[in-house]
Amino acid sequence: MKDIYVVGVGMTPFGRHPDKSVKQLASWAVEDALQDAGCGREHVQAAFFGNSAQGYMEGQLFIRGQVALLPQGFGGIPIINVENACATASTAFHLAVNQLRAGAADVVLAVGVEKMYSSDKAKMFALFDSGWDLETVEANARQLKKLGEGVEAPAGTTSDKPYSVFMDVYAAFARQLMRRHGITQRQIAAVAAKNHVHSVHNERAQYRKPMTVEEVLASAPITFPITLPMCAPISDGAAAAILCTGEAIARYGLDSSRAVRVRASVMRSATARDCDDLANHITRLTANAAYQQAGIGPADMHLAEVHDATAVGELIQTENLGFCEPGGSGALAESGATTLGGRIPVNPSGGLESKGHPIGATGLGQIFELVSQLRHECGPRQVQGARFAVQENGGGLWGVEEAAAHVGIFERVAG
């Protein structure tokens, strides 16, 4: 396959942007990515625009990408609208990679943007109800209950305030880990505390306040074993990437010293596996395929950005990415191995829990961090000597796993 490179990235701060529209957030990220790449918009031959919530929140159901990008001067090129739940931005990136691999373009744009925050809390949280099959809600709930059978929620550990249905999903996953492997609530809290500490040095993170394990455990409950700081917040924001072929770097005079090579980009959809068949988890299969495509393995990775919509997600994905044996993720987190300075730093950005989770932008936000890390441009949160990095991003729920998953592997090519 052709060598594909990320030559420019841009990202707004994630958080609340009441004074910014979807158009303005997208423009902010795209302009920064173009400037970072040293690339003119006239060189961009296709754009993949990721957004999940605008149709529900604002009524802009169709042509979202055209509405956002045509005023920015991207007229005439293909603009492809992408929606794939929380994996939306990674899907836009994956399509951009394949556009280049197919030879249909040599410079492309991938952008993801979301405005999710609303004063109407009920509407804001109801957005997430579309992340699973609405015809089988009762069956979905029964499957989740089965995951955590044998681990009862103590009295007073479920919030009476509205929250996303996916917190119940992650709580079920957590109880499964507790039942099968003895994972503890304290180990889950260790993930959250680590990510809140990491985010202190990320100027684009929504939350930048360090927390201890004890503070995480003592915080307001959401649904057992999850407490509030273990959860990603509701966020607005945008992220973008400029991708190109190796030939285009020379053709357009781009800076090869800051280019980051895409060693793998793999997507899968869910399968109808049994809930306890974790060996065939969608992310494990996707990661295995990505490692095969890249020609390297888990032991070669220097850092990872994973989908921690709750801290439980990070435990699940560090196992699926092969950083520890099945059931070993809690001990891995508690040991400090996934902390900056540890064996395999995970979510040096602060992760979704602290950096924020504007679902249509999340995957490209992860890629922004990895590209910056591989360029060695992350200052106090820099992973020293980073050469290889892996990104994992999932979206929605089908059966007992994510409906969609993306794993990307990236390589520093500068000396």
Image: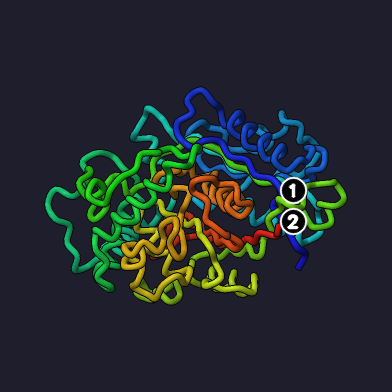
* Mark 1 surroundings within 10 Å by alpha-carbon count, few (fewer than 14), some (14 through 19), many (20 or more): many
What residue is rendered at 27% in x and 73% in y?
A: 180
Residue toward you, 282 or 365: 365
Q: Position of residue 316 (x, y in %)?
A: 39, 64
Q: Earlier in the sequence, mark 2 or mark 1?
A: 2
For disc 2, the neighbor class at 10 Å (few under 14, some 14 to 19, many from 20) is many
Above/below status of 53 relative to 223: above
The quarter of the picture where residue 69 lies is: top right
Q: Amino acid at mark 2?
A: Gln
Q: Quadrant of the C terminus?
A: bottom right
**Residue where numbered disc 2 is placed:** 99
Q: Contact, CB < 8 Å: mark 2 with mark 1?
A: yes
- The residue at the point 57 percent across, 59 percent down is 386
Q: Tell me residue 59's x, y (percent).
A: 53, 32
Q: Position of 104 compared to 359: left or right?
A: right
Above or below residue 236? Residue 300 is below
Residue 55 in view: no
Q: Nearer the viewer, residue 177 or 125?
A: 177
Task: Kindly state the secondary structure of the residue where label 1 is placed.
Answer: strand
Instruction: State which quarter of the image contains the N terminus.
Output: bottom right
Residue 95 location (% of width, % of height) = 67, 55
Label 2: state its secondary structure: helix
Residue that mark 1 sits on: 108
Q: Which is in the foreground here, disc 2 or disc 1?
A: 1
Identify which residue is drawn at 52% across, 36% down.
237
Snapshot quadrant of residue 43: top right
Mark-to-mark CA distance, 2 and 1: 8 Å
Residue 291 versus residue 354 in the image, above or below: below
Residue 317 at what x, y percent from top left? 43, 64
